[in-house]
Amino acid sequence: MDFSDTHEEAAFRAEAKAFLASSAEPKGGTFETWQSRFPDYEGLARAKDFQKKKAEAGFAALSWPKEWGGRGLSPIYQVIYAQEETRYLVPRGYFEIGLGMCIPTLFTYATEEQKRRYAPPALRGEEVWCQLFSEPGAGSDLAGLRTRAVRDGDHWVINGQKIWTSGAHWADMAILVTRSDPKVPKHKGLTFFFLSMKSPGIETRRIKQISGQSHFNEVYFTDLRIPDSQRLGAVGQGWGVAITTLMNERLTSGDYRGPDFDEIFSLARTVRLDGDPAIRNSAVRERLADFYVKSQGVRWSRFRTMTALSRGETPGPENSIGKLVNAAKGQDIASYAMDLMDMGGMVMDHDWAPMRAAFQEALLSSPGSRIAAGTDEILRNIIAERVLGLPGDVRVDRELPFEDLPTSKR
Amino acid sequence: MNFDFSPDQKALRDQARKFLGEHASSTRVRRILDTDAPYDTLLWQGMAEMGWTGTAIPESYGGAGFGHLELCVLAEEMGRCVAPAPFASTVYLATEALLLAGSEAQKRRWFPRVAAGEAIGCFALAEGPEAPAIESLGTMAQGGALTGTKAPVLDGDVANFAVVAARDGDGVSLYLADLSATGVTRAALKTVDPTRSVARITFTSTPAEPLGEPGAGAALIERLFDRAAVLVAFEQVGGGQAALEMARDYAMGRFAFGRPIASFQAIKHKLADMYVAVELARSNAYYGAWALSTDAPELPVAAAAARVSASEAYFHAAKENIQTHGGMGFTWEFDCHLHYRRAKLLGLLLGGVPRWKDLLIARLEARADAAAPAASPA
């Protein structure tokens, strides 16, 4: 057992360090993010500038084939780059969906000409992509989506609604999965497209979350027309294409980011309880120990995953334990830290609350982390079925025509 | 990055699993469970012949001269099968105590016999149904003789030698006693896990030699328990994994309401939570193994985290395994209770979880103080 890089990994790490040192500035504090420094569209404009530099230096898409501007590297290098990046104020949440999910789907299903047209501008941050998948009635059960695609000559006419679309309000391009045939079972009647978000017939509305932030959108389609040449995969085979996209999501999706053990440990050493630092209290110590062993368990599990990646092996779905454990732990840490502040825990004023109200912020953002990119419940199903080999649930929706399935009352 | 065991160590694991599958099968474990026999002597002899009892003993003393990573691999396998043998007491405690503090003569006397499976060792600290108060132990050492009563002592009924914590003129020190010496009386105590035995040992002017520096007992015990905590964590991870697999296999085969109960989310999510607990414990144990095998300064924190994580994960997996089995789970006939009993025993063997959580936080505080001595409130 040792924690050192291989020769190649060490060389890559040095190169990444040098690039970041010359192109990015260090974070002002643990919780400073690109978005907290640069609001909204200013953040986007600056992110595009940074992405251009990142692409020129060859760090924009490490796993992409070399012919498309990538380096053809295994995922361990993405992990190394991400480790080096954590100390810097760098854009997050602008290009990951395009580079990690949309363009790789094009690599599998689009024509050479289309790849040549769309991959380079995405890599350089000139075109931002979003992913039009979830719907109000189709979240965990994505294949229950109802956005309708009807063929009209060499076009398709789209009507319906998507939701939880990150970045749709500023995206230039999108991938979209639709229902083209409601008369066949749900997984067999889907068709997949890509499109310009500037097309007529698209309306985007931002969603305000309980945290006050707006990461997501609702997107409405009214007689939106997409050329059949922008279909990815065969008619009715959209589910298979969507799976390709989602396989890439596991490598792309962000983990919970918020106050963890170090922050609550530091808080417990600072705030007082019965006249002593709270950490002197045995009940507090026990809770802190629980948080610590979970945090470390996830941390060392990641090192085991990295070991597999470093050997060129594919880590299994056991990867999903990280988000499952961290999101719920983040919520518990936020809530318990506020308990330690006692009445003061109510206050979310950044200039008054400890650590610029990071715990209060986390209280309001962590519920979303337990739901986005796989709910706690879906992740438990994934572990049960894909890791432990338990049977899938008994399904009542596999064989029936989609249009005959019962739906939520509205 | 290589946070994994080596191919040789994995080969050792495969070999151990094969051997234990034959010699520590459920049938063999139940022979100890159902009788008054304190441990499986054939299994113990077999382990010695495989070189396991001398794994970490240097070759110059008749051992195999492997490192502690090999011992971790073996511990996990013994945990899986609930091995009914005095391995933890002899190898993780008595042998480690001699490795840490033993004189040349003490090592020469006991190591070859341990490696050959001819001597069982034990560690005697506790003096009653409460956390041992190290500074006020009742057992006294004076003029090279021990007097006092120790209980519970794991494998104390069958051990040939004991490492004993006692008070003397220098404070608390460790002593090494040959249990065939005069003034030793011992009685087996009934335990929650009858596949392991526990005794009360009374010393009456029993001759004993100091082990390690006089007055260094408390510090030595702390170091010894950190080392043992990592090794026991691997037994716990192995046991937790086995309990999870039992629950999975039963849920797949058991039908209710017209389908395998493994297809119900109530069961699937329960098993997923068991898996998560065991995996987090495994990762914490791996870090402990790294710290132990490299004698890293991180060992005290790593060992306490491994101890807490693995004790809780094994007990969680063992109790939920019974729950998954329904009524059959609490019968004597099914093996679920073997893990339930062992999980609790291992969770207490080096002191209970609440005490280790407190210790973990104390060590993290010390580490933080060392890093930033004059930290002011934010």
Image (tube, helix red, strand yellow):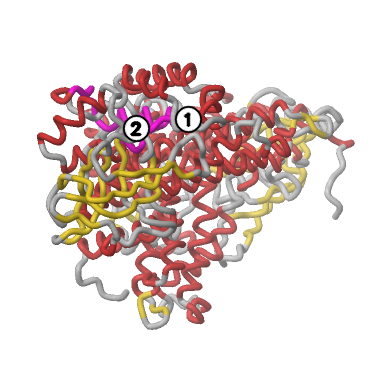
Compared to residue A58, the image places residue B312 above or below, namely below
- Residue at (53, 33) in percent of width and height: A317
**Proximity of marks 2 and 1: CB atoms separated by less than 8 Å:** no
Question: Label 2: which residue?
Answer: B72
Q: Measured from the top left, where is residue A13 in percent x and y? A: 26, 38
- What's the chain of the residue with tag 1? B
The residues bearing labels 2 and 1 have C-alpha atoms spaced at a distance of 27 Å
User: Where in the figure is residue A11, as x and y percent of width and height?
Assistant: 22, 33
Predominant secondary structure, magenta span: helix
Chain at tag 2: B
Query: Dot 2: what SS?
Result: helix
Above or below, A360 against A173 in this view is below
Residue A279, quarter of picture = bottom left
Left or right: residue A197 versus residue B240 is right
| Image coordinates for residue A186, horizontal then vertical, percent | 78, 32
Q: Mark 2, mark 1: which one is toward the viewer?
A: 1
Q: Is B44 in the magenta?
A: no
Q: Is residue A70 left or right of residue B328?
A: left
**Residue hosting label 1:** B37
* Residue interval drawn in magenta: B62-91
- Residue depicted at x 67% and y 50%: A163
Q: Is residue B24 above or below residue A252?
A: above
Farthest residue in the left direction? B104
